[in-house]
Image (cartoon, rainbow, N blue to C red):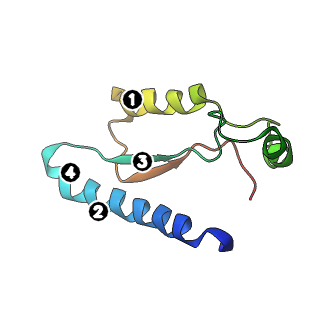
Amino acid sequence: MAGELAYAISKGAVHQMTRSLADALADRGITVNAINPGPVDTGWPSNELRELLRPAFPRGRWGRLDDIAAVVRWLISDESAWITGQVIDAEGGFRR
């Protein structure tokens, strides 16, 4: 993402913050994770951009809000109690 260095650097900071907070809070029984949703169609992209990036998605579509909500539901469930310090790439195999 050479054209978006500030954005890319901030993503790296989120990764490190997630790991560090998970370590700092583990003794309290608190898990810390983050989700990298990749491109999600929340209404912001133009039709031109939607079509331009469509081939970059193996399933032929942008992410949807319910795709990310499913990951959030899992993370707040007991099923994910063993997961901490992770950044989960929920981006549908998006090809950069």
- How far apart marks 3 and 1 lie (CA) works out to 16 Å
First-in-chain label (2 vs 1): 2
Secondary structure, mark 4, is helix
Sequence-earlier tag: 4 or 2 = 2
Q: Which residue is under mark 1?
A: 79
- Judging depth in this view, the residue of 26 and 55 nearest the camera is 55
Label 4 and label 2: CA atoms lie apart by: 10 Å
Q: Is residue 73 above or below residue 15?
A: above
Q: Is residue 95 above or below residue 31?
A: below
Give the spatial CA distance, label 4 vs label 1: 17 Å
Quarter occupied by the N terminus: bottom right
Q: How many marks?
A: 4
Residue 40 visible in this rendered orientation of the protein: yes
Kind of residue indicated by mark 2? Ser
Lower sequence index among marks 4 and 1: 4
The residue positioned 51% from the left and 28% from the top of the image is 69
Residue 34 marker: 3
Disc number for residue 26:
4
**Is there a contact, CB below 8 Å, between mark 4 and mark 2?**
no
Mark 2: which secondary structure?
A: helix
Q: Please report contact status of discs 2 and 1: CB closer than 8 Å, yes or no.
A: no
Report the residue at 14% width, 51% height from top: 27
Residue 29 vs residue 39: left or right? Answer: left
Which label lies toward us, 2 or 1? 2
Residue 79 relative to residue 68: left or right: left
Does 6 appear above or below 85?
Answer: below
Circle 1 sits in a helix, a strand or a loop, which is it? helix
- The residue where tag 2 is placed is 20
Q: Nearer the viewer, mark 4 or mark 3?
A: 3
* Residue 23 percent coordinates (x, y): 24, 58
Residue type at mark 3? Ala
Label 3's element? strand
